[in-house]
Amino acid sequence: MLRAAAARGVRRAASLLHRFQSTLVIAEHNNETLTPITLNAVTAAKRLGGEVSCLVAGTSCDKVAQELSKVQGVAKVLVAQHDVYKGFLAEELTPLVLETQKQFKYTHICAGASAFGKNLIPRVAAKLDVAPVSDIIEIKSPNTFVRTIYAGNVLCTVQCDEAVKVFSVRGTSFEAAPTSGGSASVEKVTPPPPVGLSEWIEQKLSKSDRPELTSARVVVSGGRGLKSGENFKLLYDLADQLNAAVGASRAAVDAGFVPNDMQVGQTGKIVAPELYIAVGISGAIQHLAGMKDSKCCYDCHFVSCLKTCLTEPCKNCCTKPEV
């Protein structure tokens, strides 16, 4: 009887704990559309239990707020609009996140582990005087997370005992939350005074008819083995036929073959397409860390046989490793 009573007490305590859990997801967007990784972060937040709210900060982001209000699992959308959020500078967004956490008493704060999240989350954690947990791939409990270390070769389980848990989410490890069926309320929040530590100058966007790299179903990547930027035209032609995105290894980026927004890897973009075609890439562990969740990988070592290998694999240079 004592054991049964103790078990009931543990379950009741766990239920109360979940009831008091609340998570703030910091939305990533461009004032017009939501970045897909935010939907993955919402799914991660839902696994914590408790209420999930989303913070949308921008210059004119009502459209994004309405989009988020329809996402399943989101209870509340908080909107802050001000010219100071042009460019989404971490120096200006951090005070807003801190004020929002203070007002609503959130126990967890998270964002996608993109360039945006990797810039913002550590700063928020530092201001809260807590240790952040970066790039999580699994949630075991409200205070226990799994992340990768050593370029993805080892899984590390982390128990976080901080009063406020601050973490970033690897988008490829969580399904995207459904974008319909939700009915979240939308509330305006007052932005804190501008910090003025930095100023947004400009942003130069490269337009492409190809799919966005992090969300593409097929990715064709090139490495130093391509030997020049001109040879990347082979990949562009192939990508256009496959409706694929084009990526690159860090070696190709550092050599100046392609711009750095094409880099796939630990210090670049994380991708998980249904098909990943690597051409002239040696396979450094830092690159593998950025594409290891791909469903199928096709590795072609030599550019000279790329065309024939795609139809009839050459035993000497092509492999189809399990990923």
Image (tube, rainbow, N blue to C red):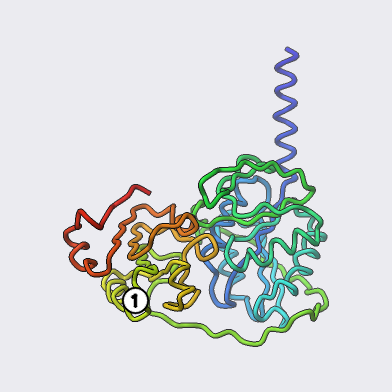
Q: Tag 1, which secondary structure?
A: helix
Quarter of the view holding residue 192:
bottom right
Within 10 angstroms of label 1, few (less than 14), some, or many (20 or more) residues? many
Vertical order, 150 against 7 (above or below): below
Q: Amino acid at mark 1?
A: Phe
Residue occupying the point 53% across, 57% down? 171
Relative horizontal placement of residue 33, taking residue 6 as reference (left or right): left
Residue 204 at x, y = what percent? Answer: 54, 85
Vertical order, 258 against 132 (above or below): below
Query: Which residue is nearer to you in this view: 309 or 85?
Result: 309
Vertical order, 287 against 196 (above or below): above
Relative horizontal placement of residue 184, taking residue 6 as reference (left or right): left
Residue occupying the point 62% across, 76% down? 61
Quadrant showing the N terminus: top right
Quarter of the view holding residue 247:
bottom left
Residue 31 at x, y = what percent? Answer: 59, 77
Residue occupying the point 30% across, 57% down? 298
Residue 28 at x, y = what percent? Answer: 60, 68
Which residue is tagged 1?
Answer: 232
Relative horizontal placement of residue 190, taking residue 304 as reference (left or right): right
Residue occupying the point 33% across, 65% down? 279
* Farthest top residue in view: 1
Quarter of the view holding residue 124:
bottom right
Relative horizontal placement of residue 197, taking residue 53 as reference (left or right): right
